[in-house]
Image: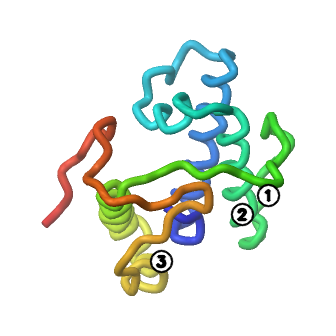
Amino acid sequence: MHPTLLDRRALVAGWRETLLAQKVLRGETKGYTRHPQLERFRDRPDPLQDIADYLHAMADEADRRGYNFDRGRISVDRSTTPSTINVTAGQLEYELAFLRQKVEGRDPEWGRSHLDAVETPTPHPLFAVVDGPIESWERVKPLAG
């Protein structure tokens, strides 16, 4: 999801989880190594650069909102020509539905003002949307009807 679509809790959680994923890719932790979304980065020619570019975009949104994400924790400088990672339309739609469900329970005002009008979810700037279903690595959770 594009960081602008994330409520405060999702943005902060995404930042923390991605910093942990960066540690996994650097071999600095024994936990979290089997998280399915790591497949997005592991199969890339330069996974540390890609995850750094992902983090920089999250930090850009934090800056825009006046939050203080410590860019010093990102292990690689931002690429001047970031590559893109494919994400299926089905995956993006599932992530939006899951986000809407979570936001409805914790910040319904955010959902009304930022998500209700979204028909086609915008991807994170690092991602390019391609046709396809939910990714095979996703652990699909039931969504409220």
Residue at screen point 32% across, 60% down: 131
> Mark 2 and mark 1 in contact (Cβ < 8 Å)?
yes
Name the amino acid type tagged 2: Ala
Name the amino acid type tagged 3: Trp
Per the model, the C-alpha gap separating discs 3 and 2 is: 16 Å
Depth check, front residue: 139 or 104: 139
> Mark 1 and mark 3 in contact (Cβ < 8 Å)?
no
How many numbered tags mark residues here? Answer: 3
Q: Residues within 10 Å of mark 3 (few under 14, many from 20)?
A: some
- Mark identifier at residue 110: 3
- Quarter location, residue 137: top left
Q: Position of residue 8 (x, y in %)?
A: 58, 64
Q: Which residue is mark 2?
A: 62
Q: Secondary structure at mark 1?
A: loop
Q: Position of residue 126 (x, y in %)?
A: 61, 55
Q: Position of residue 129 (x, y in %)?
A: 44, 61
Q: Secondary structure at mark 2?
A: helix
Q: Secondary structure at mark 3?
A: helix
Q: Is residue 88 above or below residue 74?
A: below
Depth check, front residue: 12 or 115: 115
Q: Which residue is mark 1?
A: 68
Per the model, the C-alpha gap separating discs 3 and 1 is: 20 Å
Colouring rule applied to residues: rainbow
Q: Residues within 10 Å of mark 1 (few under 14, many from 20)?
A: few
Mark closer to the chain start, 1 or 2: 2
Question: Could you tell me which quadrant the C terminus lies in?
Answer: bottom left
- Quarter location, residue 57: bottom right
Residue 22 appearing in the image: yes
Q: Is residue 73 above or below residue 71?
A: above
Mark closer to the chain start, 3 or 1: 1
Residue 105 appearing in the image: no
Q: Residues within 10 Å of mark 2 (few under 14, many from 20)?
A: many
